[in-house]
Every structure is written in structure tokens, then in C-alpha cells.
Image (spheres, rainbow, N blue to C red):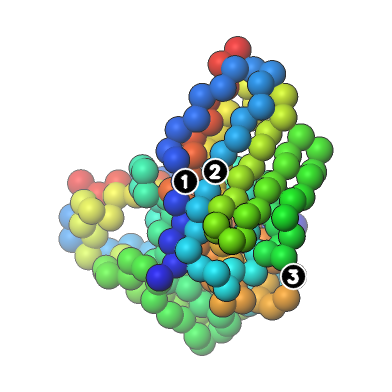
């Protein structure tokens, strides 16, 4: 099982550029989410999805778009990169419903905006 | 609103016990989790506790939950240098959304 796969692992962007961070999972999980991790601030939820065709905003959605056309994929788009978006981005997936359904995380994408 | 708070740093000597504390605000949380993050890696689940339990033990790990005070702790017995990492407390709300604390960086001195 590959679990949750994120690409790329590292990326440097210039201010104003756009790009898409990829996330794919092979566990048939309904719930997928994107977090950003900044020093001393833990993980902050950007966007999440509870199934194909359904997305919603998290705590810090501004400057990011998502879509969920399939159960497996949940790409995160930066529309016009800003230095404030320099961070480590994590994608996670989990089942929905009863039970202690843990979140499975990708390895992260380290993004630097110059 | 939903919030999870943890202290940012903890330093212990190898062989001692580590206790990492966490407070949360959402009384409707169903599950509470401890995740571990090693350098350059994603988060991995260490253990979890259901909200109607007081304690859970899993080898060197003991989780204590005080639901009245909304306080969660993780005790690591016989702490080793390999335990050095960031530990995140998290609560699950609304059936699927997981809210994370800022993480506690554990330093283990040899």
C-alpha cells in the first residue's frame, strides 16, 4: 500500500506564480484534507473534502483552491503565490464514521515563495 | 470554537519518563489522538483514546484523559533518544474533522 502520496517534495516559486500540489491516496478514504505547518502554530486546516465533488474551507483557505473529482485525488492549487505561503504542506486522508479512524499523512511538500 | 493547546518544548534525560500535556475545548470530541512527527516526515499515529475512557496503556505509552477539565496527557516511560520528535495532540470533532495542537518538541538528552 502506498498510502498517501504527495508531490513534489520540494518547490521554490516566485511571487505571483501559480502551482498545484498533488495528493493521492489508495485507501478508498472518503475524507481528505490539506494542512499547512508553520513553526509554533501546529497544523492548520486549509481545505477539506468528505467525498468526490464535495469540498469545504478550513481555517486558512485564502489563496488556495481545491477540487475533488475522484475519491483518490485531492490537489491543492496556489493561485498567485505569496511569501506568506512559504510553509510545509501536508495532505491527509481518513475514513468517515464510527471508530478511531486515524488520519494518514503524506510526507509533506516544502514550499518556498521568494 | 475548537482549540487544542500544548506546551511547545519538553526536555528530559534518557531513561526518565516524559509527560506531554494538552488541553482541548470541544466537549463533543469523540476521539483524542497523539501523533508523532520525526524530522522531515509526516505525522504518524502513536495512540488514541475514546472520550469515555480515563486511561489507555500501550507498552511504554500511557494516555490519561480528564474529561471534566478537558485535559489529555501522554506519558512515555523509559524515554529513549529515538523518542526525540514533535508530538501532536489532536481531537476529532463532527465525525471526521481533526483539530491539531501546535505540537510539543521533545528533546531527550543522553
Q: Position of residue A37 (x, y in %)?
A: 41, 50
Same chain for mark 1 and mark 2? The answer is: yes
Q: CB atoms at circles 1 and 2 under 8 Å apart?
A: yes
Q: Residues within 10 Å of mark 1 (few under 14, many from 20)?
A: many
Image quarter for residue A93?
bottom right
Return the residue nearer the eye: A42 or A13.
A42
Same chain for mark 3 and mark 1? The answer is: no
Q: Residue furthest right?
A: B59
Tell me the quarter of the image containing the N terminus of chain A.
bottom right
Between the C-alphas of marks 3 and 2, the distance is 24 Å
**In the visual, does A43 lie left or right of B77?**
left
Same chain for mark 3 and mark 2? The answer is: no
Q: Residue at x 60, y 12 (%)?
A: B110
Residue at mark 2: B21
Return the residue nearer the eye: A12 or A86.
A86
Question: Residue A99: which disc?
Answer: 3
Q: Residue furthest top?
A: B110
Q: How many marks?
A: 3
Between the C-alphas of marks 1 and 2, the distance is 6 Å
Instruction: Give whichever of discs 1 and 2 has the lower sequence position.
Output: 1
Question: Residue B6: which disc?
Answer: 1
Q: Residue furthest bottom?
A: A53
Residue B39 seen in this snapshot: no
Task: Please tell me whether mark 2 sits on a helix, a strand or a loop.
Answer: strand
Amino acid at each position: 500500500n502506498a498510502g498517501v502520496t504527495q508531490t513534489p517534495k520540494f518547490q521554490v516559486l516566485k511571487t505571483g506564480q501559480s502551482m498545484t500540489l498533488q495528493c493521492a491516496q489508495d485507501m478508498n478514504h472518503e475524507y481528505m484534507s490539506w494542512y499547512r505547518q508553520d513553526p509554533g502554530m501546529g497544523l492548520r486546516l486549509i481545505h477539506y473534502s468528505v467525498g468526490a465533488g464535495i469540498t469545504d474551507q478550513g481555517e486558512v483557505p485564502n489563496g488556495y483552491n481545491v477540487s475533488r473529482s475522484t475519491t483518490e485525488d485531492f490537489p491543492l492549487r496556489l493561485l498567485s503565490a505569496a511569501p506568506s505561503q512559504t510553509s510545509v504542506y501536508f495532505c491527509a486522508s481518513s475514513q468517515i464514521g464510527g471508530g478511531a479512524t486515524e488520519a494518514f499523512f503524506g510526507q509533506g511538500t516544502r514550499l518556498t515563495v521568494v | 470554537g475548537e482549540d487544542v493547546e500544548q506546551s511547545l518544548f519538553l526536555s528530559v534525560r534518557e531513561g526518565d519518563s516524559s509527560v506531554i500535556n494538552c488541553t482541548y475545548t470541544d466537549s463533543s470530541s469523540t476521539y483524542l489522538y497523539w501523533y508523532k512527527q520525526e524530522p522531515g516526515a509526516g505525522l504518524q499515529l502513536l495512540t488514541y483514546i475514546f472520550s469515555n475512557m480515563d486511561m489507555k496503556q500501550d507498552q511504554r505509552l500511557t494516555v490519561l484523559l480528564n474529561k471534566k477539565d478537558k485535559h489529555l496527557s501522554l506519558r512515555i516511560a523509559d524515554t529513549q533518544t529515538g523518542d526525540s520528535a514533535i508530538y501532536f495532540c489532536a481531537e476529532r470533532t463532527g465525525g471526521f474533522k481533526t483539530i491539531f495542537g501546535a505540537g510539543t518538541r521533545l528533546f531527550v538528552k543522553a
